[in-house]
Image (cartoon, rainbow, N blue to C red):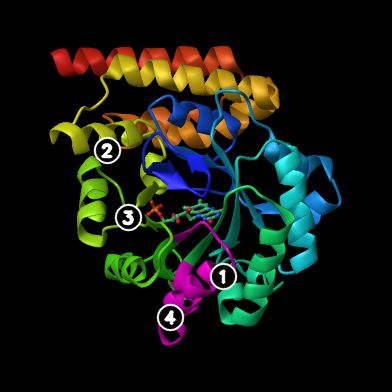
Amino acid sequence: MKIGSLELKNSIFLAPMAGITDLPFRTVVRSFGCGLAYTEMVSAIGLARKADKTLRYLSTSPSDRPLGVQIFGSDPETLADAARIAEQHGADLIDLNMGCPVKKVTKTGAGAALMTDPALAAAIMQAIRKATALPFTVKIRSGWNARQANALEIGKIAVESGCDAVTLHARTADQGYSGHADWTLIARLKGHIRIPVIGSGDIRKPLDASRMFQETRCDGAMIGRGALGNPWLIGEALSFIDDNHNHEPTLAEREEVIIRHLDMSAAFYGERAGVRDFRKHLLWYTKGLKGGARFREAAGQITDRETTITAMRDYFHEIAHESEA
Ligand SMILES: Cc1cc2nc3c(=O)[nH]c(=O)nc-3n(C[C@H](O)[C@H](O)[C@H](O)COP(=O)(O)O)c2cc1C
C-alpha cells in the first residue's frame, strides 16, 4: 500500500500510544513485520521550543523505518513548525492527532477537540500541508460524541486540505476506550473519500485484522492495545491473511523477545529508568500466563536488569515444566 509517496511493505501498522510506542517497543514490533509505526503523540509547542524532553520522542534508528511522527496542538503555525522539525529529525510521515480524548489535551483545543472546530482543523491541515512535502495523515475519532459524530465531514476536509490518508479510531471521544469500535463507520468513510483509510479499534486477534479488511474495505489496519505484551500480533495477523492459521509464539520465543525488549529499554533510558519503565511491559507480557499474577507481584519490585532476567527465566522455566508435567 502507498501513503502519498511512501511505499509500505504491508498494510498493518502499529498505532501511536502515549507512554508505550517508544523506540524500543517500536523496534520489537517491527521485527515481526509491521508496515508502519508511529511515535506517541508529541507536543507541537514542545517541538517548536526545541525542548530536549520533547525532541527525545523523535529518537529513531535505521531499523525504525518507516516512521510516522504524530504531533498534537491547536495552533496552525506551531503545528507547521513542529512538522518541519519532525521532518528535519528524520520523520518519514507526519500525522496530526485529532483523537486524543484526555482532558489535559482537549482543554487546550488539541486532540479530539479539533473535531468540534472544522474551520480550525482545516486551517491546521493546510498549514501542515504547506510546511512539509512528507506524506501527511490525520488520525480522527468518530466525533466528539454521538450527537456530533462528524468523521465523514472531517474526512472530506482532510482530502480538500491535501492529506494523504485518514486513520479512524471508530469511537467517539466521550467513549474513551470503552464499548466497541463501530467498524461500519470505517466502511462509510472508505466509501466517502478517495484517499486511503486506515481503520483503528479492537484488533485483538489475528482474525480481527482480516475481518476489518473484509468488513470495511479499509486500506490499512492499525493495532494498538492488542500489541501490548503481544508484539508478534502484527506478524500473526499478516500470516493469518496468507494462510488462515494462527502461529502463536512458543514460551522460548516469548522469553527471547522479552529480554531483547528489556535490553533495548535499558540501553535507551539507562538501566534504572529503563527497567522501571519496562515493568509495565513485563506485566503485559505475562498476562494470562499460568502463575503470572504471582510473578508480576514479585517483578513489580525489581530495579535492575540482571534480577529481572533471572526472575523471568525462573518463571518461564517453571511454567515450561508445569506444562510438560
Ligand atoms: C495507552 C494508550 C495510549 C494512546 N495514545 C495515543 C496517542 O498518543 N495518539 C493517538 O492517536 N492515539 C493514541 N491511542 C489510541 C490508539 O492509537 C488506538 O487508536 C486505540 O487504542 C484503538 O485501537 P486498539 O483497540 O487497537 O487499541 C492510545 C491508546 C492507548 C490505549
Question: Which numbered disc, 4 or 3, marks the residue that appears first in the sequence?
Answer: 4
> Could you tell me the amino acid type at mark 4?
Ala
Is the CB of the residue bearing disc 3 within 8 angstroms of ligand 1?
Answer: yes
Residue identified by numbered label 2: 237
> Could you tell me the amino acid type at mark 2?
Ala
- Please tell me the numbered disc located at residue 101: none
Asked whether 86 or 147 is in front, the reply is 86
The outermost residue toward the bottom is: 147
Asked whether 298 or 136 is in front, the reply is 136
Asked whether 105 or 95 is in front, the reply is 95
Residue identified by numbered label 4: 149
At 36% from the left and 37% from the top, the residue drawn is 10
- Element under disc 3: loop
Question: Which numbered disc, 3 or 2, marks the residue that appears first in the sequence?
Answer: 3
- Please tell me the numbered disc located at residue 112: 1
Residue identified by numbered label 3: 202
In the rendered structure, which segment of residues is drawn in magenta? 141-167
Q: Residue 64's x, y, as percent?
A: 56, 29
